[in-house]
Structures are given as structure tokens and as C-alpha cells.
Image (spheres, rainbow, N blue to C red):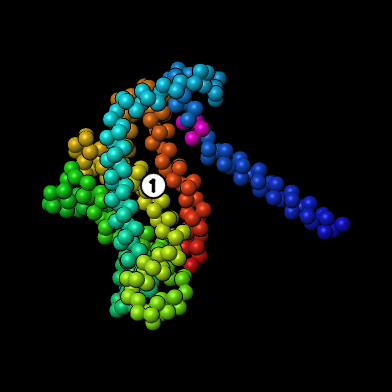
């Protein structure tokens, strides 16, 4: 009887936890559902009381109207170009720095890594003006260089830290065996460490994509030519020009949100594994 009662109690606890998680998930999904629902309505129907969650009728023409109201294709290509350059730069250089901090021994390694971590505690606003002055002196304003070049020098210190923690948890015997076979540190990194660190690499790739795709501050600061704007800037301009046409604004926002959502679901398993294992190690 006690065993049966314990199983029933455990089942009840799991049911309660499931219900709580389900309610929490619905609360977090509510804004997204509101967004999609509003993108298929007329402006008057969006705020009609009592609220209607199902569009009557579905206004699918909101999407082509929203995408033609601004140079969506131009902004999309600009954003993709920046994303590709930043992704490639980050995934090439961040593992190099992380490998040097975790698998190689050299004088001052831990001190330099500590200094690197302190940069995470510096607010972005503190470095904004000096960084802008630097790029102005270099003549890089109104170009994509300020948005992409930093990624080719390790990218974010957080990515280096994440990869360093993951690399440090891999057995060092793999490196030693490779060195005995005549491998160089470069070969150890790209043929042994990187293949074993797929979850961490995908996590960095997802974080990088989300950060660049939704970046508004950088393009606004460094880009002056409207033909070079990204989707985030274009959506901001669209909101200012079409603030009363909420249905078109919701449709444009929905389209821009689709790539990050698809990317997250494709890499969800590796993303969660990389966060968990990186934090534990």
C-alpha cells in the first residue's frame, strides 16, 4: 500500500509541475500569439472589444502590403550579409582564443583571461563614444566594418568564456595522443576539439545570430545611408511611418521573427546541451 501511495503521490506531483509549466508556457506565448493574430486582422478588429482571437476574415494581404511598404528585400540582404560575416568571424576566431586559454600553457595565460572576463562587466554605454571616435578616425562610418570586424578578433568575450569552459572539460589525453602522432596545435583544435564541441559551437552560432539579427543600436549608430539599413532599423522606420497601421506593423514583425524561431528549433537540442554542459564544466 505504501508503495502504491508513493507512486500516486509522485504522479500527482508530476501532474502539478506539468500544469504549472503549461500555464507558464502559455503566458510566455501570449505576446507571440497576439502578434500573429493581429497580423491577420484589420486595424479596427485588433482593438475591438470584446477581444477576438480568431481573425474574421483572415487578411492574408497584410503580409504583401507590409513587405512592399518598405524595401524589405534590400534590408533582408543587408542583414544576411552582416550575419554571415559575423558568424564566420566568430566561429573562426572565438575557438582559437578559447583553445589557447584552455588547452595550451603559456606565461600570463590566466592573468590575460581574467582581464578578458573583466570586460564583461564594463557597460556598453561606457565604450560607445570611444569606439565611435575610433571608427570615425579610421573612416569606417557608414560601412559595415564596425559591425563585422570585431567578430574577426574573437567576437564577444562571453563566447570565448563559454567555449573555454567547454574545451577545458574535454579529456586532455586526446591532445597528448595527437601530439605524439605529430599533430600541431592547429590540427588538434580543428580535427579533435572542434568536432567534440559541436553543442558549444552551435550555441555560440545561435547566440551570434540572434544578437546580430536583432541588433538595432549598432546599425543606427554607424550607418547613415538608408540603402545599407538592416531589418531592425527598417522595422523601426516602418513603425514611425505606419504607426497607425498596426496590422501591417504586426505582419512585418512576424516575418522578421520567423528566421530566429526556425533557427532555434533546428538547433534546440544542441543549444540546450551546450548551455548545460558549458555551465557545469
**Crowdedness of circle 1 by 10 Å Cα count: few (<14), some, many (20+)?**
some
Q: In this view, does 6 lie above or below 259?
A: below
**x, y percent for residue 73:** 30, 33
Asked which quadrant contains residue 196, the reply is bottom left
Name the residue nearer the viewer: 197 or 8.
Answer: 197
Residue 10 vs residue 236: left or right?
Answer: right
Provide the residue designation for mark 1. Answer: 210
Q: In this view, does 192 lie above or below 66?
A: below
For mark 1, give the secondary structure.
helix
Residue 110 vs residue 222: left or right?
Answer: right
Q: Which residue is drawn at 21% across and 44% down?
A: 222
Residue sticking out furthest to the right: 1
Q: In this view, does 92 lie above or below 77?
A: below
Q: Can residue 114 be seen in this view?
A: no
Which residue range is magenta in the image? 31-35
**x, y percent for residue 160:** 36, 62
* 53 in magenta: no
**x, y percent for residue 193:** 41, 68
Amino acid at each position: 500500500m505504501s508503495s502504491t501511495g508513493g507512486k500516486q503521490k509522485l504522479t500527482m506531483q508530476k501532474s502539478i509541475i506539468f500544469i504549472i509549466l503549461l500555464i507558464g508556457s502559455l503566458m510566455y506565448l501570449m505576446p507571440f500569439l497576439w502578434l500573429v493574430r493581429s497580423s491577420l486582422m484589420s486595424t479596427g478588429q485588433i482593438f475591438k472589444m470584446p477581444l477576438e482571437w480568431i481573425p474574421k476574415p483572415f487578411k492574408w494581404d497584410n503580409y504583401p502590403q507590409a513587405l512592399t511598404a518598405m524595401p524589405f528585400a534590400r534590408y533582408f540582404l543587408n542583414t544576411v550579409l552582416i550575419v554571415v560575416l559575423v558568424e564566420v568571424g566568430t566561429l573562426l576566431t572565438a575557438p582559437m582564443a578559447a583553445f589557447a586559454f584552455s588547452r595550451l600553457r603559456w606565461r600570463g595565460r590566466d592573468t590575460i583571461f581574467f582581464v578578458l572576463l573583466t570586460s564583461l562587466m564594463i557597460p556598453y554605454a561606457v565604450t560607445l563614444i570611444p569606439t565611435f571616435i575610433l571608427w570615425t578616425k579610421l573612416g569606417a562610418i557608414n560601412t559595415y566594418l564596425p559591425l563585422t570586424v570585431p567578430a574577426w578578433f574573437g567576437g564577444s568575450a562571453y563566447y570565448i568564456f563559454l567555449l573555454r569552459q567547454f574545451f577545458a572539460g574535454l579529456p586532455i589525453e586526446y591532445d597528448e595522443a595527437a601530439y605524439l602522432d605529430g599533430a600541431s596545435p592547429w590540427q588538434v583544435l580543428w580535427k579533435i576539439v572542434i568536432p567534440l564541441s559541436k553543442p558549444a559551437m552551435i550555441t555560440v552560432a545561435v547566440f551570434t545570430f540572434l544578437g546580430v539579427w536583432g541588433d538595432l543600436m549598432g546599425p543606427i549608430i554607424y550607418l547613415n545611408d538608408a540603402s545599407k539599413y538592416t531589418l531592425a532599423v527598417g522595422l523601426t522606420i516602418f513603425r514611425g511611418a505606419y504607426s497607425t497601421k498596426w496590422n501591417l506593423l504586426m505582419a512585418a514583425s512576424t516575418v522578421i521573427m520567423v528566421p530566429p524561431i526556425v533557427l532555434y528549433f533546428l538547433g534546440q537540442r544542441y543549444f540546450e546541451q551546450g548551455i548545460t554542459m558549458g555551465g557545469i564544466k
